[in-house]
Image (cartoon, rainbow, N blue to C red):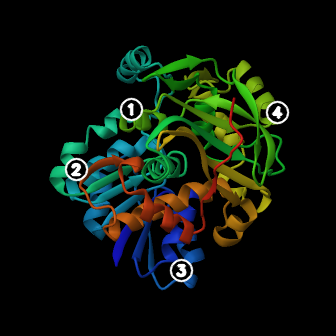
Amino acid sequence: MAKVVIIGTGGVATVGAVKCAELPEIFDTIIIASHHFEKCEALVQKIQPHTKATLIPAYVDAGNLEEMKGLFDQYHPDLVLHLGLPYHNLTIMEACVEKKVHYIDTAAAEPENVNDPEFQKYYQKRCQEKGFYAYFDYPFQWAFFDRFQKAGVTAILGCGFDPGATQAYVAYAKKHEFDTIDTVDILDCNGGSNGYPFATNFNPEINLREVSSPAAYWENHTFHRVDPMSIKEEYDFDGVGKRDIYLLYHEEMESLGKNFPEIKRMRFWMTFSKSYLDHMRCLEDVGMLSPKAISFEGHSIVPIQFLKALLPDPATLGSKTVGKTNIGCIFTGKKDGKEKHYYLYNICDHQAAYRETGTQGVSYTAGVPAVCGAIMLLTKKWDKAGVYNVEEMNPDPFLQAMSENGLPFQESYDPEMVK
């Protein structure tokens, strides 16, 4: 049995806490920590009556290194599930490596202040060298590898669904279905509806930064930039139906390109409704998506952060959201000298997720893989020190754990292909 700290109190953290509490034989003590202590208390009160595990609320500013180390000194956890904002990845990793605690997160690190001169210097150089323009990437976290290895602990980066499960799908496909993989199309379809004219399914600031950034795809070992939302296709998703999909940049392509250099082309696609895009473009046109601070009536405000405060909290959308998600990977490649197509995917029902965890399916699909990654580390099915992305670990027990905990995969050997 093990002690785990969960950082965060939003939708994904709620899923993480509920799913860990369902497995007291593995997670006997669960500390829910955040700077919103009252939310930690509320989660504990909600979950504790239904589990034999011990749940403890705790206050911490996850961006403060000394507070993180103090939390570890107080509770001596075996593992941290960082299910909060990616702004704090590096601080939490620093605390983990100093205190010898395993680490898992669900998204690549990015700075809260993208206008910081030092970050902008790095960002502009990276954009020119690598060809993608998102604010998030992995090198700062990869740089911890030697220190984690020396400390004898493991960090698993991006262990949500995408990134996360999608990378395990690539590793599984290479291990069982292909000799070589030529192309990968990662498809993320949210076919759910929540009744709002405009709402995001995870943190609005992170979501809108991601969607409004220039897109990019991977081909011939480099990224190629395209304008945001400029490439659109239609795809008929199992369990959902026909939806418009748009090419985006997403962080798993960075690590997959590094770990599977044989892949000739890789693309990431996400569905958006016309209403969502119309609202987003209007907000962008009037400057509400800007991360740069402005002066308003003597106060400094960041427009996108102000917008976040106005939009519905994604953690409250569970009861209102109906429909399904469909997320997976379509592969082309060769097996025994023959061309082959293969599709590996999961369908998640929003209302089923809500009945179990009180959250909608997008939070569920991110939280369950993180808990499964924790299971892998604590049961030593993944047992090597250092810093890794999900595709570098054995996919078989991980996908089995996902299937046992609410996210079984499906397969097609004759899938519809993306143009």
Q: CA distance from mark 3 to mark 4?
A: 41 Å
Residue 148 is labelled as 2
Residue at image coords 67%, 67%:
358
Does residue 309 show up? yes
Residue at image coords 34%, 33%:
139
Neighbour tally class for label 3: few under 14, some 14-19, many 20 plus, Cα within 10 Å = some
Whichever of labels 4 and 1 marks the residue nearer the N terminus, that label is 1
Residue 261 is labelled as 1
Nearer to me, 338 or 117: 338
Q: Amino acid at mark 4?
A: Lys
Q: CA distance from mark 3 to mark 1?
A: 46 Å
Q: Amino acid at mark 3?
A: Gln
Residue highlighted by disc 3 = 48
Residue 274 is labelled as 4
Q: CA distance from mark 1 to mark 2?
A: 25 Å
Image depth: mark 3 or mark 4 in front: 4
Q: Amino acid at mark 2?
A: Phe
Residue at image coords 54%, 59%:
367
Q: Amino acid at mark 1?
A: Pro
Whichever of labels 4 and 2 marks the residue nearer the N terminus, that label is 2
Nearer to me, 184 or 71: 184
Neighbour tally class for label 4: few under 14, some 14-19, many 20 plus, Cα within 10 Å = few
